[in-house]
Amino acid sequence: DAMVIQNPRYQVTQFGKPVTLSCSQTLNHNVMYWYQQKSSQAPKLLFHYYDKDFNNEADTPDNFQSRRPNTSFCFLDIRSPGLGDAAMYLCATSRAPSGTKDTQYFGPGTRLTVL
Amino acid sequence: SQQGEEDPQALSIQEGENATMNCSYKTSINNLQWYRQNSGRGLVHLILIRSNEREKHSGRLRVTLDTSKKSSSLLITASRAADTASYFCARTQGGSEKLVFGKGMKLTVNP
């Protein structure tokens, strides 16, 4: 089945130790998104790629970076995780940006714990 | 706040009852979408309603949109224990590609 896959599902890292979360998709969608969702809060968009074009949200900290080496894969790099970065990180895809009425398909998320 | 606001924030009902969740927003929209999130999982898309539409159905789900009141409602009929989840409304607006989520509403359906 076509889907959005996130690995790992659970990630534990130490304060300040770089960590990478991965997302892959078999939907062949143009757009890939990364969201941060803290407990009992709404998902917050960090950035997205439209094909190879990177679009950063204005309030996304510099500590968060992303790479998209090909259509199928997208990575979220947290250079120096702080305790406040502990959250669920959700990857999503869409055929086209949501402004053109397309829906987003979400992966199961990676729960990040920072010790 | 730019977020949509779901109302109520938490709802507990018995299996078989209907559940209605409301979402309000402050700016004009292109479309409004409803998502479900089971505990600790990703979001599942339920329904998308465009700004020129007033009502859409999908199985036991019914979504209405009132752009004059800047509000939408999600009705789940004949609820089941498996409907227990958090529900989010999300919207796109203007020329932005961004999907703006509301705070979410936790629905508990008791067997």
Image (cartoon, coloured by chain):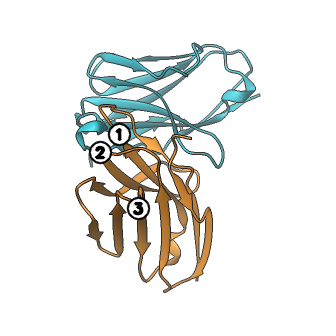
The residue marked by circle 2 belongs to what chain? B
Mark 3 or 1, nearer chain start: 3
Pick whichever, A42 or A16, lies toward us.
A42
Q: CA distance from mark 3 to mark 2?
A: 13 Å
Residue B72: give its label.
3
The crowding category of the residue bearing disc 1, from other C-alpha atoms within 10 Å (few below 14, some 14 to 19, many at least 20), is some
Please provide percent x and percent y for residue A78: 58, 19
Quarter of the figure with residue A27: top left
Q: Say left or right for B28 vs A8.
A: left
Does the image show residue B102? yes
The residue marked by circle 1 belongs to what chain? B
Residue type at mark 3 is Ser
Q: Say left or right for B65 vs B53.
A: right
Please provide percent x and percent y for residue B104: 55, 54
Q: Which residue is mark 2?
A: B30
Q: CA distance from mark 2 to mark 1?
A: 5 Å
Look at 53% across and 84% down and name the residue there. Answer: B15
Query: Is there a contact, CB below 8 Å, between mark 2 and mark 1?
Result: yes
- Chain appearing in orange on the rendered image: B
Quarter of the figure with residue B60: bottom left
